[in-house]
């Protein structure tokens, strides 16, 4: 449990946050072109269809790109710095921005295998999906 900024929730993003509360990562899936997508939208970014449903995904992916924040972008992040801010490419295709936690930021590399983890935000009903390195040993 730690302090964080609480992300705003809307009708469109509610299923994402509900899944996270249950320690599951969910993204939209287009029934028309069989593609997963993220962030949540009213229409599929590939084909424009509105036939989107929410599906739980594996939570596995790799680091597409990342940066390390040494200075907190907001006072609430001071206890988290240095903080790895990364674009994660999920196994199912979509990319999402998150944090990589549970490791020395200096060990993070592009292409590194990661898996989702769930961080409860203090004094809130929000659980934040973050990522940790996949242990290879
Ligand atoms: Zn589509």
Image: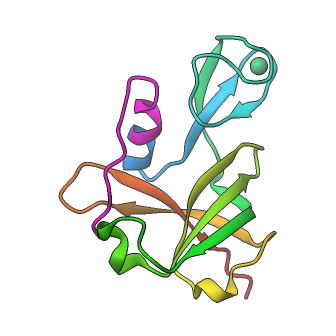
Magenta segment, which residues?
2-17
Residue 91: percent from the left, percent from the top? 76, 51
Q: Residue furthest left?
A: 123
Q: Is residue 17 above or below residue 69?
A: above
Locate the C terminus and report the quarter of the image it occupies.
bottom right
Q: Name the side, left or right, on which 66 lies relative to 103.
A: right
Prevailing secondary structure of the magenta residues:
loop
Residue at the spot 73% in from the left edge and 24% down from the top edge: 45
Q: Is residue 31 above or below residue 99?
A: above
The quarter holding residue 104 reads bottom right
Locate the N terminus and report the quarter of the image it occupies.
bottom left
Residue 122: percent from the left, percent from the top? 23, 63
Residue at the spot 43% in from the left edge and 48% down from the top edge: 20
Q: Name the side, left or right, on which 9 lies relative to 54.
A: left
Q: Is residue 22 above or below residue 105?
A: above
Residue at the spot 34% in from the left edge and 77% down from the top edge: 78
Q: Nearer the viewer, residue 73 or 76?
A: 73
User: Is 16 in the magenta?
Assistant: yes
Residue 107: percent from the left, percent from the top? 68, 87
User: Is 9 in the magenta?
Assistant: yes
């Amino acid at each position: 449990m730690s302090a964080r900024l609480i992300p705003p929730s809307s009708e469109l993003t509610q299923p994402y946050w509900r899944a996270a509360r249950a320690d599951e990562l969910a993204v939209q899936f287009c029934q028309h072109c069989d593609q997963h997508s993220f962030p949540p939208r009213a229409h599929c970014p590939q084909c424009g269809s509105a036939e989107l449903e929410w599906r739980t995904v594996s939570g596995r992916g790799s680091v597409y790109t990342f940066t390390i924040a040494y200075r907190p972008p907001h006072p609430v992040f001071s206890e988290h710095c240095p903080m790895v801010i990364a674009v994660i490419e999920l196994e199912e295709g979509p990319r999402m921005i998150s944090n990589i936690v549970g490791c020395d930021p200096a060990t993070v590399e592009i292409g590194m295998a990661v898996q989702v983890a769930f961080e409860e935000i203090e004094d809130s009903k929000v659980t934040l999906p973050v990522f940790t390195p996949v242990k290879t040993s």
